[in-house]
Image (cartoon, rainbow, N blue to C red):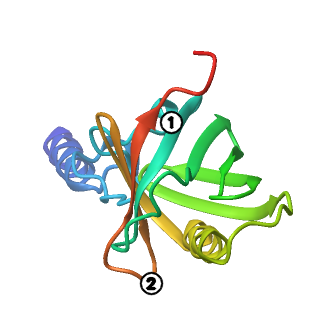
Amino acid sequence: MKRVHAGLCVALFVVGACAPKPPDERKEQPVDDRAAAPGTTTDALWGTAWLLEDLAGTGVIDRVEASLEFIEPGKIGGRGSCNHFFGGVELAGRSIVISGLGSTRMACEEAVNEQEGRYFAALEAAQRFELDGDVLRIYLHDREEPLRFTRHLPVGE
């Protein structure tokens, strides 16, 4: 009887050792492409300001400032080219979603207004970002070229 009992214990031990482990004990976890890659941590963006250098492959008008500020978690603002704007932002890993943009309504030259309209549309098409030192790239869901920004210190800093 002791041999049967010992054999049963060994069998149960082997079965238990081969049983699948709970997800948190597995060595290989599924890859989450929203996970932050080096240089893309969302905390690094809060409280920063950026100047637009390239509008998804089309450049920007000289001496017409377009900017983007990550004011605090969930809030962005900046200058569209002519008007100041504000809106909401969600960051998770490398993904970025900008929504609810609103702006002042100053009248500007036609070319500046047109650039501002393209900039606002691009911000609302934002999908993911890369932070590389003093360069921020925001990739859009409908364009191959990203928005490219350089770090900017707001007035007074």
Q: Give the Cα distance between marks 2 and 1.
A: 23 Å
Residue at left offset 32%, top offset 42%: 25
Where is mark 1, residue-wise? 45
Q: Is residue 87 visible?
A: yes
Q: Position of residue 155 (x, y in %)?
A: 62, 24
Image-based side of 53 in relation to 27, left or right: right
Query: Label 1 amino acid?
Result: Leu
Q: Quadrant of the C terminus?
A: top right
Where is mark 2, residue-wise? 142
In the image, residue 71 sits, relative to residue 156, either above or below, namely below
Disc 1 residue crowd, few under 14, some 14–19, many 20+, Cα 10 Å: some
Q: Nearer the viewer, residue 82 or 118?
A: 82
Image-based side of 152 in relation to 118, left or right: left
Residue at left offset 59%, top offset 75%: 111
Discs 2, 1 touching: Cβ within 8 Å: no
In the image, residue 32 sits, relative to residue 35, either above or below, namely below
Q: Is residue 22 visible?
A: no
Q: Residue furthest bottom?
A: 142
Residue at left offset 17%, top offset 49%: 14
Image-based side of 143 in relation to 127, left or right: left
Q: Nearer the viewer, residue 58 or 26?
A: 58
Q: Position of residue 95 (x, y in %)?
A: 47, 58
Q: Nearer the viewer, residue 69 or 89?
A: 69
Query: Label 2 amino acid?
Result: Asp
In the rendered structure, which disc, 2 or 1, sits on the residue that comes first in sequence?
Answer: 1
